[in-house]
Amino acid sequence: MFSLRLIILLAVVAVLLWLLKRLFSAEPEPEQLDAKKTENMHQCKYCGVHVPESTVLSVNNEPYCCQEHADLDQH
Ligand SMILES: [Zn+2]
């Protein structure tokens, strides 16, 4: 009888942990939210600054915020 209660308790704890894990993974990741907000934005490969697609500088298929950072990353 006592061990049965223990098993039930362990099962409940396991289910709670599983639910918490699911809840945690269901949350949208900040990166995904950021991607929605900054649509058509590119991240400078050198400094990580987000640059609009219209002003992004593409060197060797890599996005950069300015020519200086493109040059710095090449050397
Ligand atoms: Zn940069």
Image: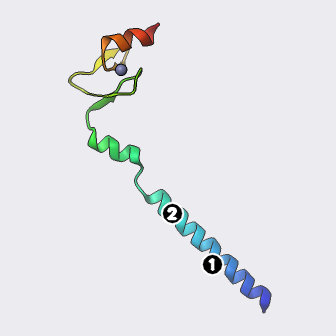
CA gap, disc 1 to disc 2? 15 Å
Helix or strand or loop: what does disc 2 sit on? helix
The picture quadrant where one finds residue 46 is top left
Amino acid bearing label 2: Arg
Label 1 neighbour load within 10 Å: few <14, some 14-19, many 20+? few
Image height check: is 51 above or below 8? above
Image height check: is 13 above or below 28? below
Q: Quadrant of the N terminus?
A: bottom right
Q: Earlier in the sequence, mark 1 or mark 2?
A: 1
The picture quadrant where one finds residue 38 is top left
Residue under the image location 37 percent in, 45 percent down: 32
The picture quadrant where one finds residue 66 is top left
Amino acid bearing label 1: Val
**Disc 2 marks which residue?**
22
Question: Left or right: where does residue 65 sit relative to residue 26?
Answer: left
Image height check: is 31 above or below 2? above
**Disc 1 marks which residue?**
12
